[in-house]
Image: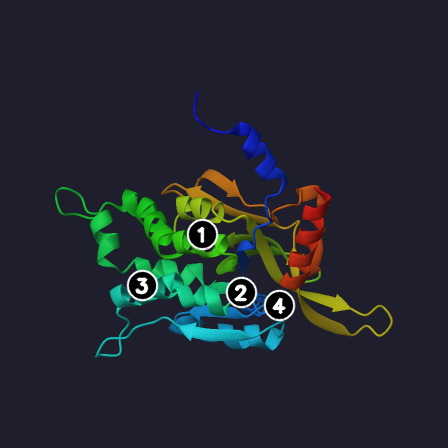
Amino acid sequence: MTGVDFKKLKAESHTAKLKPLFAIIIGPSGAGKSSVCGTIGVSTLVLHNSVEHHGPLAARTAGRGEVVGLDYTVFNAKSDIDVEKTLANLLAILRDENVQKEFGAVVLDSATELQKIVAQTDEFRKYCLTDKGTHNSFKEGEAYIFLLKKYMIDPFVKLNNAGLHVITTCAADVKSLSEDGAVSECSPKLLGFSVAHDLIRAFSDVLLVSRVVDVDDETGESKSTHRLLFKANISKQSKDIKGQVLKTANFSPRISGFTLNELPDTAPADLSKIIIGREKQAKKA
């Protein structure tokens, strides 16, 4: 006997509440990653470092609720980034109980930049250190995941359990485009095959945003918009020293609560509509 009350467990499963978004938004530069983060429809805290300073403005421009930007970067006396204090500051912000009181969503812009920061830390170097004092490059993937989990995933889980939507953005390299300029194939801009594989699978919701060119059939005029794509291919390859592909990981865009067949080819880049759609879907279950 395990001591688990399975009858109670079954009853609770029928009344379980739909969790808020736990999403990673992937897209190339200019695709609208930051903008779509402003469409959640609730008070949103956008955390960014000095490189992603444009993020909060783009999110506010989308205008589906109050958007507050906060740069978590800490500089030293020489005006260089103090990576250790920067990460400590990020963690302190994500753990601050006032965040749960003041906001309905937290966005970290971006996972790509966060990985670059953790790569410069003493924690990363020590994790990859051999007994002989040399750097073991084969430990890098494991080190990245350990630190990304510490500084993003773990605090995200706590915020999500507290009722907040949590989102990170991730840059992507475009492999091919369709005729309307939309991304048809891309690769997440993360260092290491295992990092992309393990990080993306940690998110319940995987969204791909792209700039799409619509042409008016009558006037012939073209208009550029941002769209969420669900049939495009997101993948990461592992190659040997000669450039031969060893393995490929595919990440299908997904929304928790929907099967892949229930998702459209594309949808407006509006997370408030995604949230409403999930709520309606949950009521059917």
Amino acid type shown at disc 4: Gly
Residue 227 picture location, percent across and down: 66, 62
Q: Which tag, 3 or 2, sits closer to the chain's start? A: 3
Foreground mark, 2 or 4?
A: 2
Assign the N terminus to one quadrant of the image: top left
Q: Disc 1 to disc 3, how far (Cα)?
A: 18 Å
The image's colour scheme reads: rainbow
Assign the C terminus to one quadrant of the image: top right
The dot on residue 87 is: 3
Residue 226 in the figure: left or right of residue 77:
right
Foreground mark, 1 or 3?
A: 1
x 62%, y 73%: residue: 62
Q: Disc 3 to disc 2, how far (Cα)?
A: 23 Å
CB atoms of marks 2 and 1 within 8 Å? no
x 73%, y 44%: residue: 284
Is 51 situated above or below 239? below
Residue 211 picture location, percent across and down: 64, 65
Q: Disc 3 to disc 4, how far (Cα)?
A: 28 Å
Crowd rating for badge 3 (residues with CA inside 10 Å; few <14, some 14–19, many 20+): many
Amino acid type shown at disc 2: Gly
In-front residue for pair 70/27: 70
Q: Mark 1 = which residue? A: 157
Q: Mark 4 = which residue? A: 41
SS at badge 3 = helix
Question: Is any atom of residue 213 visible in this view?
Answer: yes
x 26%, y 79%: residue: 79
Q: Mark 2 = which residue? A: 104
Question: Is any atom of residue 263 visible in this view?
Answer: no
Foreground mark, 3 or 4?
A: 4
